[in-house]
Image: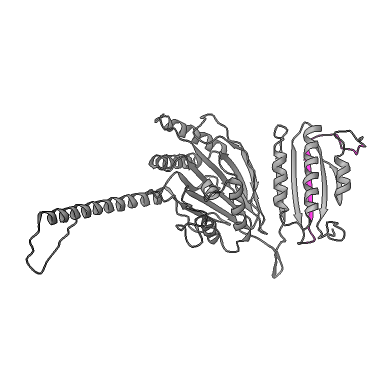
């Protein structure tokens, strides 16, 4: 209800034109009040939907770990869209972290998001493994999407099962960006994980599981593509922008979550635009999981263990394209290495070792790359293990030979290398020692 009154201190006689103007103003005011009332009702409804569909994360929800989450809608009217996150306690004592994105930003996307989130929570609570949870969710979304064949929808999703005691993460991914790990020293790696089709496209799709370990002091970021691509970025440039924020941040997890959102939406708040035109082009959902650091108790003092950078990657016989992924992982691991020449040498030798396994054996290659020591005196050790029985030997290829130079290159470029037989198979390794001039001499002592 609304009323508008015009009062005068003396008698006034209105002409027909004046009466028409006043009646028009009254109608305009009535319409404005109506629109304001509808807008308030819609805002209250969507705020209620957001509170209902997205959980409120309290402190210490996961023992020994911290979790922070953010959800920012596009601002196009609805305050809840197709993006969502969830933290689910599992019957095994573990926890599941879920983040996903239903296609679209309309009411239908929000409705499908709510149904899919409930379905995923139900499947997870039954104790299914990550691959089975996503397979069931894909069949569920495919079934309810068939109810409206004129508007089929799909969803991307990452499902992470977390073991709080060991830090082990079992990850299943459905067409979604890979997680990123911030190591204890600030180094950030995007962790490549196996994945399947987005949910709802193929009811019989498979979702392989990748196992990672979150070390003490490390933080995992999973997010929807709105955090990466908003502001005119693609996946590559968007990740570079986020990597700078992750590497430079010194505060707690909640402050890091705010910094990541503000990097997209502007310097002062979630709702201001930044320097790259209007940033409100996609919903943003984000989860951060941090494992508490630990030291080793020595009497009455606490000695902090020096940080170790490590990455582990499997390259299967049928996945030769993952050699490029391994090279990128190594470059990210060595982002602050003193000598660019040593970095190029490490990437070259890694390519040789992985290629030799795929060409000369029938087994998969397991890569372990590790950096130890203080800055300026660090040691890089790269080890590639396979199940082949034949030990490699140095060859003397002719000038026109197309192969046979792998061990020759390792002997020339590495500071140390060797071949270790295993119970099954063998392991070939090499080491590089950091120095400002690239020589490595005197820069590291065992």
Let me know if residue 361 is in the magenta part: no
- The C terminus - image quarter: bottom right
- The N terminus - image quarter: bottom left
The residue positioned 55% from the left and 43% from the top of the image is 158
The residue positioned 86% from the left and 52% from the top of the image is 415
Query: As drawn, is 58 to the left or to the right of 297?
Result: left
Q: Is residue 219 visible?
A: no
Decide: is 365 above or below 417. above
Q: Is residue 433 visible?
A: yes
Decide: is 315 above or below 440. above
Horizontal and vertical percent for residue 276?
Answer: 52, 54
Decide: is 179 above or below 391. below
The residue positioned 80% from the left and 40% from the top of the image is 352
Report the predominant secondary structure element of the magenta stretch: loop
Query: As drawn, is 106 to the left or to the right of 227?
Result: left
Identify the magenta region: 376-395
Query: As drawn, is 168 to the left or to the right of 412?
Result: left
Choose top left, top right, bottom left or bottom right for residue 184: bottom right
Q: Nearer the viewer, residue 26 or 436?
A: 26
Horizontal and vertical percent for residue 183?
Answer: 66, 55
Count of numbered marks = 0
Query: As drawn, is 66 to the left or to the right of 365?
Result: left
Horizontal and vertical percent for residue 43?
Answer: 34, 52
Let me know if residue 377 is in the magenta part: yes
């Amino acid at each position: 209800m609304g009323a508008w009154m015009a009062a005068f201190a003396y008698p006034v006689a209105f002409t027909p034109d004046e009466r028409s103007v006043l009646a028009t103003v009254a109608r305009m005011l009535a319409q404005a009040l109506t629109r304001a009332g509808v807008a308030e009702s819609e805002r209250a409804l969507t705020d209620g939907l957001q509170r209902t569909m997205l959980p409120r994360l309290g402190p210490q929800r996961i023992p020994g770990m911290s979790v922070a989450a953010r959800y920012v809608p596009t601002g196009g009217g609805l305050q809840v869209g197709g993006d969502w996150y969830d933290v689910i306690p599992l019957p095994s004592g573990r926890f599941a972290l879920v983040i996903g994105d239903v296609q679209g930003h309309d009411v239908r996307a929000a409705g499908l998001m709510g149904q899919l989130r409930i379905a995923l929570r139900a499947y997870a609570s039954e104790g299914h493994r990550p691959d089975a949870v996503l397979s069931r969710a894909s069949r569920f979304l495919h079934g309810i999407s068939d109810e409206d064949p004129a508007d089929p929808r799909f969803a991307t999703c990452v499902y992470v099962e977390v073991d709080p005691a060991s830090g082990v993460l079992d990850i299943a991914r459905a067409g979604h960006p890979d997680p990123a790990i911030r190591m204890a020293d600030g180094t950030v790696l995007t962790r490549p994980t196996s994945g399947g089709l987005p949910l709802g496209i193929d009811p019989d799709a498979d979702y392989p599981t990748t196992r990672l370990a979150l070390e003490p002091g490390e933080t995992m970021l999973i997010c929807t593509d709105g955090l990466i691509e908003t502001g005119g970025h693609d996946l590559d440039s968007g990740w570079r922008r986020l990597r700078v924020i992750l590497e430079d941040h010194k505060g707690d997890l909640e402050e890091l979550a705010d910094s990541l959102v503000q990097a997209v939406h502007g310097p002062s708040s979630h709702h201001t635009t930044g320097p790259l035109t209007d940033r409100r082009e996609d919903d943003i959902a984000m989860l951060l999981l941090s494992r508490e650091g630990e030291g080793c108790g020595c009497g009455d003092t606490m000695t902090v263990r020096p940080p170790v950078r490590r990455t582990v990657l499997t390259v299967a016989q049928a996945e030769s394209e993952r050699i490029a992924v391994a090279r990128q992982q190594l470059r990210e691991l060595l982002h602050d290495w003193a000598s660019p020449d040593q970095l190029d040498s490490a990437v070259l030798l890694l390519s040789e070792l992985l290629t030799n396994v795929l060409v000369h054996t029938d087994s998969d290659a397991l890569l372990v790359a590790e950096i130890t020591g203080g800055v300026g005196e660090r040691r890089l050790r790269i080890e590639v293990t396979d199940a082949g029985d034949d030990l490699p030997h140095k060859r003397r290829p002719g000038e026109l030979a197309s192969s046979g130079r792998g061990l020759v290159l390792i002997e020339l470029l590495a500071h140390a290398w060797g071949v270790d037989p295993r119970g099954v198979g063998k392991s070939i390794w090499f080491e590089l020692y950091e120095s400002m001039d690239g020589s490595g001499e005197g820069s590291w002592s065992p």
